[in-house]
Amino acid sequence: MSGFTNWTPLGRGIVKIGKLIDKDSIVYRGVFDRKEVAVKSVLDTNEKECEILRNLSHENIVKYMYMEQEGRTLHIVLELCSYSLKQYVLQEDHCNISLTPIEVLKQITEGVYYLHTGQTFCTVHRDLKPSNVLFLYVKRDAKWVVKISDFGLSKDLSPDKSSTTSYVKGSPGYIAPELLAFSDGTKGHGEIRKETDMFSLGVIFYFTLSGGKHPFSNDPYAVNAKVRDYELSLCELGGEYKLAESLILSLISKDWKERIKIQDVKSHFIFWDWSKTLNFFQTASDFLEDRIKHQKLINAFNKKCNDITGGDWFEKLCSEPDKPKVCETLQRRKKKTSLQDLLRQIRNWGHHYNDKATSDELRKELGDFPDGFIQYFTSRFPKLLPHTYAVLSEKKDELVLEDFYGIKVEAAVKYTEGAQASCSSVPMPNDEDDDDDDNELLGLDDESISPANQASESKLILRNYQKELAEQALAGHNSLIIAPTGSGKTAVANEIIKHHLKEENSKSVMFFVSKTTLALQQCDYFKKYLEDLTEREIAYLIGENTTNYPIGAIMKKAKLTVLTPQILIDELRRKKSFISFNE
């Protein structure tokens, strides 16, 4: 690298510094190991910052490289970044970063998630603000990476502590209200905890999505008083970013106990792509079909229909002159106006979007699938996603919903013996389900309807088209069955499995699922309808880290095993497996 002779050496000369690039934090542009770096100079009383930085290792945390001591001054060598979040949002200094605001916030969230949960202890940053969020361009990957920096005020909390007492420090407007002086002159508690960072993160979210505004005040001299008295306004959020309003409010809640946890921020719907949003709407619609189990939830969901849709959603969709096919298709069925009906509409049109019976005109008006399709609905009903997400959060522990709320399934292998209660299921829609109307809406005949009412309490009756799907497999041929979502492929598989196991000298069956969350659901389904099998003969394996369990032995013992492909692959790779490819 040229120009090294212009640098001033420090201490033993391993580190050299040049231009001061941050006068507030005393950061210089420097050289270390023939690379340009950032050199932060602090008093030796701040050695704790070095200790914290040494222990951190994450893509979204600024990288510590070296420390040179010169008298009472510590020179901390860090990777050199290009811009700050403030420059990015306000477009200062020719900042041209190819990341959307949502992508930036996602990376910041990943960094805070690591600080709070990714170590044996928790690191509370205490000074999260736009100038401490930096951008680094990684040439080898040709991408911009967000970096959280400046750990001068940070505190580590041991696993047995949720808070620690400390002097109130931080930057105006980013200090949580419980740490500020109240109007009567008394001091805040001074308790430093993860939730103090969550408040700062909420302010950063608003700053990023509002074009540089503050939720309490843009006046640096008045902002702490506004935070203390909790006088806020989120009126600068507009367009698609309006979806983030409820999240920001939960981040900057005045009561620290009510602030959202970082793991819930990480899984929040503002970070979803359109495919996951569509998947959520479809899953939510299926989940709410069980009126017996979820009647209270359904009532709560439908109660705000007018507020969410702005009135009659059916008439709203039918009244658009440039969408004649949408109107024509909707009017083929009897009018339904509940919020649950709208959710069904999204679900069923999504399921049948690519069917031959769906006209090209309708597809064109609804938009490309899935992005344009789901935006067709979210642009007209922007409150639908946050409302659905909030209502169903009450049931976020349910297996079919946990992927949307960031709940991890513990890696484990559970044998179904005596554990009927552990096999949760998503019930078949009941006789009041609205699928018939929606298939009529798309011009489909009864043979294309999802198997809503085909199952009695213990007897499964296949429809004609399902019998055709199973025909080749029942005749003993290797078969690949391809059918739309909702057509009842599991019912077809159930029939094939039942037929196979009745054969003399039949081998055991492995039923693969794409997600661990589906294993329990499918297990419960087969337990209900494979009446010839006992509970001991059906097993399900969930989780990828299952080396502590005799997986091969369970597979050999059970007549039917429900599992993910990765579990089988891992077992076959073991040197002393109970099973082999030959089996």
Image: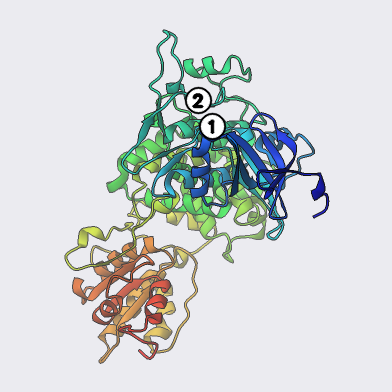
- Numbered tag placed on residue 455 in the rendering: none
Judged from the image, the secondary structure of the residue bearing numbered disc 1 is loop
The image quadrant of residue 340 is top left
- Seen at 43% across and 79% down, the residue is 468
User: Which residue position is annotated with label 2?
Assistant: 169
Q: Of the residues shown, which amino acid type is indicated by label 2?
A: Lys
- Seen at 39% across and 67% down, the residue is 544
Question: Percent x, y for residue 16?
Answer: 71, 45
- Seen at 42% across and 77% down, the residue is 569
Q: In the picture shown, does residue 173 fall above or below 109?
A: above
User: Which residue position is annotated with label 1?
Assistant: 127
Q: In the picture shown, does residue 230 fall above or below 391?
A: above
Nearer to me, 77 or 486: 77
Pointer 1 and pointer 2: residues touching (CB < 8 Å)? yes
Judged from the image, the secondary structure of the residue bearing numbered disc 2 is loop
Question: Percent x, y for residue 171?
Answer: 56, 25
The image quadrant of residue 10 is top right
Question: In which quadrant will I find the N terminus?
Answer: bottom right
Question: In which quadrant will I find the C terminus?
Answer: bottom left
Give the side of residue 78 with respect to residue 439, left or right.
right
Distance from the alpha carbon under mark 1 to that under mark 2 = 8 Å
Nearer to me, 311 or 464: 311
Dot 1: few (<14), some (14–19), or many (≥20) neighbours within 10 Å?
Answer: many
Q: In the picture shown, does residue 48 fall above or below 285?
A: above
